[in-house]
Image: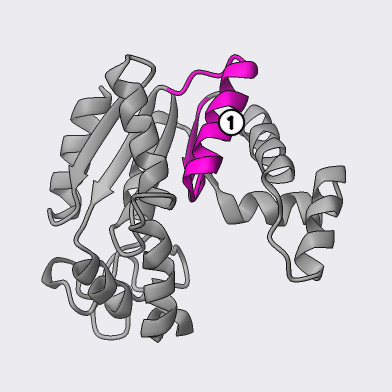
Amino acid sequence: MNILIFGPNGSGKGTQGDLVKQKYQLAHIESGAIFREHIGGGTELGKKAKAYIDRGDLVPDDITIPMVLETLQSKGAKGWLLDGFPRNMVQAEKLYDALKAANIELDYVIEILLPREVAKNRIMGRRLCKTNNNHPNNIFIDAIKPDGDKCRVCGGELSARSDDQDEGAINKRHDIYYDTKTGTLAAAYFYKELAKKGATKYIELDGLGTIDSIKDTLLGQLA
């Protein structure tokens, strides 16, 4: 099973992705990790990407897409869930073409829907567990409030990311995600149109629900 997952920062995308990974034994592949592994491993693509990053430039898609594809084929040979890519309409089209050329089936596309203001508040309230970042803790959500300054799941130490407290940084990230013309939502909608033609299956989830209700809905549609 091969899955793309979309959702704004604060939607619980990482939590749901982790649950799907465990249920179906998929490789949970995050876009940032792809860059780190290729650059850290000194691959040819990683070296090319690093040259752009060192200059402060964006890595072009003709380097990024092959890196993503190579990781999907190696780490995700038995199925994958790709998180954090594509980020815009152009990348969505190029990734789909690359998957087709490699005869890799895209089985499902998941979108977690959440109003922008709610997403921002959730980001500013979330706390990260030192043991597992996917353990849900948020001081503004009653259902997953931490136990004081300890993780509600395992009791691990909690911390807040500095950029989670920066409204300007959050707004910039959300400007990209909620852009329905060229941004990340435009990428999601590209796959939504493909689903209407039977090229994949598109699942929409209400991000305002509880973790368990979203999980149950999602797993029910993946079954």
Q: Nearer the viewer, residue 143 or 93?
A: 93
- Asked which quadrant contains residue 158, the reply is bottom left
Examine the structure image and report whether residue 194 is included in the region drawn in magenta.
no
- Which image quarter is the C terminus in? top left
From the viewer's perspective, is 32 left or right of 52? left
Q: Nearer the viewer, residue 193 or 32?
A: 193
Who's the residue at 32% across and 15% down the image? 197
- Asked which quadrant contains residue 32, the reply is bottom right
Question: Label 1 crowding class (10 Å Cα cut-off): few <14, some 14-19, many 20+?
Answer: some
From the viewer's perspective, is 14 left or right of 103? left
Label 1 sits on what residue type?
Gly
Residue that badge 1 annotates: 76
Examine the structure image and report whether residue 80 is included in the region drawn in magenta.
yes
Q: Which residues are magenta?
A: 79-106
Q: Nearer the viewer, residue 114 or 153?
A: 114
- Which image quarter is the N terminus in? top left
Q: Is residue 152 above or below residue 203?
A: below
